[in-house]
Image (cartoon, rainbow, N blue to C red):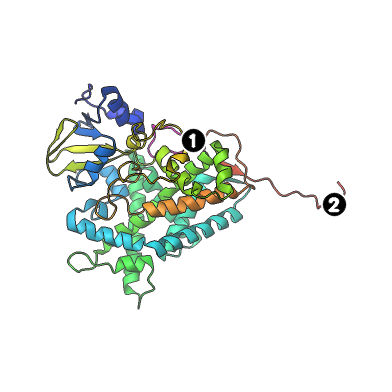
Amino acid sequence: MQWRTPDSTVALLREGYAFIAARCEKMDTDVFTTRIALRRVTCMRGAEAARLFYEGERFSRANAMPASVQHLLQDAGSVQTLEGAAHRQRKEMFLDLLGPSDLARLRSIFRRCWMEELAQSGQEMVLQDAAARILTRTACQWAGLELGSAALRRRTRELTAMINRAGSFGPANWNARRLRRNSERWAAAEIQAARSAEGGSGDVVQRLARHLDTAGRPLETQVAAVELLNLLRPVVAIGRYLVFSAVALEENPSWRRRIASGQDGTVEAFAQEVRRRYPFFPFVGGTVERAFTFADHQFTPGEWVLLDLYGTNHDRRLWPDPAAFDPGRFMGRQPGPNELVPQGAGNVAEGHRCPGEEATLGILAEAIGLLAAQDSWKVPVQDLSISLHKAPADPHSGFIMFREPPSTHAKGAPQ
């Protein structure tokens, strides 16, 4: 089914996350075609669309996203650009680096970095900025990369720019790509240092540096550097979910009380609903590898396709009253692999679903518990609105918190 306007570039930039779902609703379909930047594209949404997109090797990631996006979020040679056996073998490396003991350590490091950040903060804190610092430090310590204060500021700025500017064009994107090149040079030097080190501590960076490809050779230094960034940057990106969690706790005090009381399953359910309800990736691109038919549309090899992640997470057929924030949806229920898709669908080991999903849930659960339990920080009146027109989206104010200074009057002293 063809959308009525010849090119939808302006509409996409204007509507952002809601672009695909709004047209699917108007046309009563899960598939439609249009043009973006004059390039023909097929857009689709829903659980069945997600299954077809992520399973059965029907799609590749080649030429699936603009270079301005790919160079910031993936770059050449990374796991997401591979297909078939090469992709599965590289994905196994990521799953090994993100095994249960590694995830437990990541969560523990995050908690420590969180407590230290709060202890060092002044009377006011913008959570969005603090989360970027906390998570950059967390990711680097977890990987075995100790940074001084100046290096931590540089890495935070670079990793944040990759995330914040992925949806931008022109000078803002060019500057973010310049900052990414700085990160890649640093990451390549860390890979080389890990390879030169005697013995092995088992740090994440050393395990990555010594990983062998399908031909039994170590990864090229530049490719290993890209994959190191693909471990660090997604941890920093969790900061958006962390801030969304703070907004949700502020707007849903009954759930905050339930979490603070330690009620079983509430933290996990709350984290899942944050991932469903709030905007993260708007959509993901793919190129058709082999012909198939879905929703009366014949998909042909080479066709460019966008799968609506945000729209699938708000599909009323899957999620009644999708705009409402209701963690109860996940109490005692595990969503199907193609229903909750903020970080992709399908099988994580065999497909392109994000291997860091468990890391996201672990850090979020830790953060939600800490946010719900704290009472020394207050949230002033501010603009917590989240525009779906901007990608990536975030609360307008960045979520400001403050704590009152301790009383200057000693207990029992005359006043």
Which residue ends up furthest to the bottom in the rendered image? 198
Rendered residue at 50%/60% (across/down): 149
Which residue ends up furthest to the right in the rendered image? 414
Q: In this view, does 14 lie above or below 237?
A: above
**Residue 16: % across, % down:** 35, 32
Which secondary structure, mark 2?
loop
Residue depth check, mark 1 versus mark 2: number of the one nearer the observer: 2
**Residue 169: % across, % down:** 32, 38
Using residue 311 as the reference point, say whether residue 57 is left or right of it.
left
Q: In this view, does 408 lie above or below 227?
A: above
Magenta span: predominant SS is loop
Rendered residue at 60%/40% (across/down): 379
**Label 1 is placed on what type of residue?**
His
Which of marks 2 and 1 precedes in the sequence?
Answer: 1
| Residue beneath disc 2 | 412
- Cβ–Cβ below 8 Å for labels 1 and 2? no
**Residue 414: % across, % down:** 87, 49
| Residue beneath disc 1 | 396
* Mark 1 crowd level (few <14, some 14–19, many ≥20, 10 Å Cα): few
For the residues labelled 1 and 2, the Cα–Cα distance comes to 43 Å
Rendered residue at 43%/46% (across/down): 332
**Residue 309: % across, % down:** 32, 39
Q: What stretch is highlighted in magenta?
A: 385-397
The image quarter containing residue 183 is bottom left
